[in-house]
Image: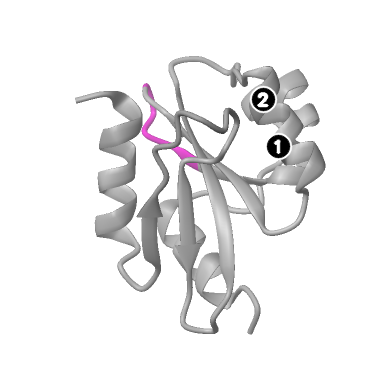
């Protein structure tokens, strides 16, 4: 199973309060991996990334998507070595590409991400 698929399964299991839809879109390049919906009726997207090092790689289409849609879009990164999970806002994509995981995240664990997503739009 691909690393991002394993990461998605872990998210789905760890944050069941959010309705997750996996977007497997081959026609619109750059579309984020997940569409989330919380109990406040708030939709948001999440791009999943798994990395072995500090660098987080994005396609030009992913960058363009987040630059064009900076609100209610997020990037969740799992570091394979440490298992650390970090959440970044979509508006931070250029900084994240430049600084990698040294960039300050808005959340530092799956549990914190779950609480954050539940509070959106409340």
Residue 24's spot in the image, x, y percent?
A: 39, 38
Residue 92 point in image, percent of width and height:
77, 39
- CB within 8 Å, label 2 to label 1: yes
- Horizontal and vertical percent position of residue 17: 36, 73
Q: Would you identify the image quadrant in which residue 93 lies? A: top right
Residue that sits furthest to the front in the current view: 27
Secondary element at tag 1:
helix
Q: Measured from the top left, where is residue 122 in percent x and y?
A: 63, 84
Q: Residue 59: within the magenta?
A: no
* Residue occupied by mark 2: 61
Residue 7 shown left or right of residue 74 in the figure: left
Tell me the residue at 27%/24% (across/down): 2
The quarter of the rendered structure image containing the N terminus is top left
Q: How many marks?
A: 2
Q: Is residue 108 above or below residue 66?
A: below
For image coordinates 72% across by 28% down, the residue present is: 63
Classify 102 as above or below 23. Answer: above
Q: Is residue 82 magenta?
A: yes
Q: Residues within 10 Å of mark 2 (few under 14, many from 20)?
A: few
Residue 91 horizontal side relative to residue 120, left or right = right
Region rendered in magenta: 81-85
Separation (CA) of disc 2 from disc 1: 6 Å
| Quadrant of the image occupied by residue 60 | top right
Pointer 1: what residue?
65
Residue drawn at 42 percent across, 53 percent down: 110
């Amino acid at each position: 199973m691909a690393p991002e698929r394993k990461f998605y399964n872990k998210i789905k299991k760890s944050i069941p309060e959010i309705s997750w839809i996996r977007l497997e879109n081959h026609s619109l390049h750059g579309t984020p991996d997940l569409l989330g919906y919380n109990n406040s009726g708030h939709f948001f997207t999440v791009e999943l990334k798994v990395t072995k090092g500090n660098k987080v790689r994005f396609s030009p289409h992913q960058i363009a998507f987040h630059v064009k849609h900076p609100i209610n879009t997020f990037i969740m990164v799992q570091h394979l070595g440490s298992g650390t999970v970090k959440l970044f806002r979509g508006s931070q994509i250029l900084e994240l590409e430049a600084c990698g995981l040294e960039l300050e995240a808005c959340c530092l664990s799956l549990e914190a991400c779950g609480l954050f997503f539940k509070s959106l739009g409340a």
